[in-house]
Structures are given as structure tokens and as C-alpha cells.
């Protein structure tokens, strides 16, 4: 709260308080989770700019009060403050989190009416909203209409396909992306690896894996974990081991993927040995770790050991 206290002292010391002062204080209270005080400051403002409204919208969104986000937006329209790109991106993000396609479409109508759809950030947020609400075809239509697509837009569309189980289309889009000389980022690679894992295609997995490794993208923890998971699900446990050993950092998620990968591919003893190594380096196991161990015990018929792990998970 030190930053808030400092901001309040500065705010109280200013004789003529402009919107910048108010907006800074709203933002400070928002980050501290004090929505009520942020709202009091907002309501105190005589002249609210679009930045002021966006600050309050962001405050409610940041603190999970999504219904109030839209009440503030409705009031913003009543008071005839013109929304900008930041406003609609935030509204679309909230609708995407809620999976509310109907309200998302209402936001789209507002975007069309106000000719905001030419902005790449707005279009990307729009396609993400459709994808997260399950309407992947509409997301693709938005994507196809975009002019000057950047890597974020490509990644969002790839993620949309992967998250909705349309793995083949995710891989096709990735090939198109490479053909257009758009350099993939970590998010793109994670989505494509997820698609490969869903398909369980050894050939596709080898191809994407070679692409990742040739560009040293597997040094990123998220990418390496996704690569590890893909190799495990495709049954290439030797490749999975190599990725795991090469990783400079490993978190509990990484260990869990390796343990589960060994378990489902019939390497029960190795899975248990990895659990022991995990404990040695003081990585705390979680429920997913024990699920992997139980899977290993089931595959190997280790009933007594399985009961031991089950009791540890419960305790």
C-alpha cells in the first residue's frame, strides 16, 4: 500500500486536480484491489475522459466484477463518452473469459457501428472472443478479413483451433504462417504442439519438434513443456527424455508431464524414479504428480505402492 499512500499524498497536495491525477489514483486503488475507493474517486470526477472510463472498466475487470464492467460501459454510452479501441478490447476480453457469445456479438455490433474493426488489436480480440466462445468459424472469418495480420493474430487463430479440438486446421494454419514468412512466437509454438499432441501423429510431431529444436525455441520453459508433452502423447518417450534432460529449468508442471509421460508409455519404474529425483531437488509434488504415480502403478500392477501414493495424496 506504500504506492497508494504516496499517490494519495500527491493527490491531496494538488490544488487543481485534473483527470490525470484522478486516473492515477483509480489505477492505484485498482491494483491494490480496493474497488470501492477507486469508484469513490471516479464518482467524484466532474469531467471524465475516455481514459477515466477505461480506468474504471479496467478496475472492475482486473478485480473480477464483470457485471459491473458492462454497467459502467452502459453508463459511459448514456453520458455520451465515445469508446475507443482500448474500451472494446477490454469488453471482448471479459466476454471471452465468460464464454458469453451473445453479449460478445453485441459488442461486435457496437464495433461495426463505430467502425472500430479496422484496428488490429480490436480484430484480434474479436477473433479470440469467438474462438473462446466456441465459434471457431466466425473467428476464422474475422482473421481472413484482417489487413496486415501480425504474429499475435496468427497465434490467436492457432490457439483457437487447438483449444477447440480442430488440430488439423491448426497445423494447416501454421504451415500457411511459415509460408508467409511470419516468425512464430512462443504462444504459436505451444498451440501447434498442443494440436500435435491431440492428433497423436508421430510424423507431425517429429516435423514440428525439429522446427522448434532447430531454432532453439525449446529453451523457453512453456515451449519445452509443451514439446515434452507432445512427444509423450505421441509415444516418442526417448525424445521426451532428451527434451526433459536438456531443459535448463524445470517446474512442477514439467516434472508432472515427464512422470505422466513415462507412466502412460509403460515405464512405471522410471516414473517413480523421477518422482524421487523431484523430491531430492525439493520440488513439491501436487495432485497431478500423484495422479501420474497412480497411473504408473496401475500399468505395472503395483497395487500396494499405488495405495501408498493414494494415502499420501489424501494426507
Image (cartoon, rainbow, N blue to C red):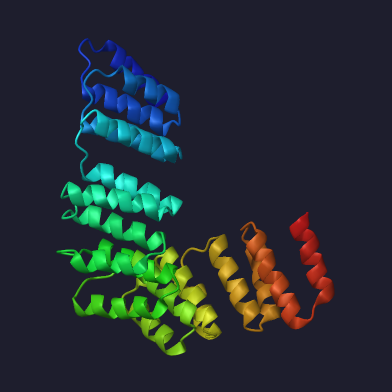
Q: How many marks?
A: 0
Tell me where residue 133 appears, x and y as whole percent: 41, 59
> Image check: 75 left or right of 257?
left
| Farthest-out residue, right | 304
Note whether residue 31 is visible: yes
Residue 72: x %, y % from top left: 34, 33
The answer to which of 306 and 92 lies nearer the viewer is 92
Where is residue 314 shown, x and y percent of the image?
Answer: 77, 56
Q: Residue furthest bottom?
A: 203
Q: Quadrant of the C terminus?
A: bottom right
Q: Quadrant of the N terminus?
A: top left
In this rendered view, identify the residue nearer to me: 129 or 290.
Answer: 129
Work out whether 57 lies above or below 11.
below
Q: Within the image, what quadrant is residue 292 found in?
A: bottom right
Q: Is residue 136 above or below residue 47?
A: below
Can residue 218 be seen at all in this image of the molecule? no
Name the residue located 24 percent from the left edge and 28 percent from the top edge: 79
Locate residue 17 relative to residue 164 in the image: left or right.
Answer: left
Q: Is residue 89 above or below residue 229?
A: above
252 relative position to 34: left or right: right
Q: Nearer the viewer, residue 125 or 228?
A: 125
Write down the quadrant of residue 38 in the picture. top left
From what the image shows, is residue 169 above or below residue 159? below
Q: Is residue 229 left or right of residue 154?
A: right
Residue in view at x 77 percent, y 65 percent: 309
Estimate the x, y position of residue 204 in percent, counting from the top left. 40, 86
What residue do we see at 23% from left, 25% from top? 48
Amino acid at each position: 500500500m506504500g504506492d497508494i499512500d504516496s499517490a494519495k499524498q500527491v493527490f491531496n497536495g494538488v490544488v487543481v486536480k485534473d483527470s490525470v491525477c484522478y486516473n492515477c489514483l483509480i489505477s492505484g486503488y485498482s491494483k491494490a484491489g480496493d474497488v470501492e475507493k477507486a469508484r469513490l474517486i471516479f464518482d467524484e470526477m466532474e469531467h471524465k475522459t475516455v481514459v477515466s472510463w477505461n480506468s474504471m472498466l479496467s478496475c472492475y475487470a482486473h478485480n473480477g466484477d464483470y457485471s459491473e464492467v458492462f454497467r459502467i460501459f452502459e453508463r459511459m454510452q448514456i453520458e455520451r463518452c465515445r469508446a475507443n479501441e482500448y474500451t472494446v478490447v477490454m469488453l471482448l476480453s471479459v466476454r471471452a473469459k465468460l464464454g458469453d457469445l451473445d453479449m460478445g456479438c453485441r459488442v461486435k455490433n457496437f464495433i461495426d457501428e463505430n467502425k472500430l474493426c479496422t484496428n488490429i488489436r480490436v480484430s484480434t480480440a474479436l477473433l479470440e472472443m469467438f474462438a473462446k466462445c466456441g465459434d471457431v468459424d466466425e473467428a476464422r472469418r474475422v482473421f481472413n478479413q484482417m489487413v496486415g495480420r501480425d504474429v499475435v493474430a496468427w497465434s490467436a487463430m492457432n490457439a483457437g483451433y487447438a483449444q477447440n479440438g480442430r488440430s488439423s486446421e491448426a497445423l494447416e494454419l501454421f504451415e500457411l504462417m511459415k509460408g508467409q514468412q511470419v516468425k512464430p512466437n512462443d504462444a504459436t509454438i505451444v498451440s501447434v504442439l498442443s494440436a500435435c499432441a491431440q492428433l497423436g501423429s508421430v510424423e507431425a510431431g517429429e516435423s514440428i519438434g525439429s522446427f522448434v529444436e532447430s531454432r532453439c525455441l525449446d529453451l523457453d520453459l512453456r515451449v519445452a513443456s509443451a514439446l515434452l508433452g507432445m512427444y509423450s502423447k505421441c509415444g516418442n518417450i526417448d525424445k521426451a527424455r532428451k527434451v526433459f534432460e536438456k531443459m535448463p529449468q524445470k517446474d512442477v508442471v514439467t516434472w508432472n508431464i515427464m512422470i505422466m509421460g513415462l507412466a502412460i508409455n509403460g515405464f512405471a519404474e522410471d516414473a517413480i524414479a523421477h518422482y524421487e529425483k523431484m523430491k531430492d531437488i525439493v520440488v513439491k509434488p501436487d495432485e497431478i504428480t500423484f495422479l501420474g504415480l497412480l497411473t504408473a502403478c496401475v500399468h505395472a500392477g503395483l497395487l500396494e505402492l499405488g495405495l501408498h501414493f493414494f494415502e499420501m495424496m489424501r494426507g
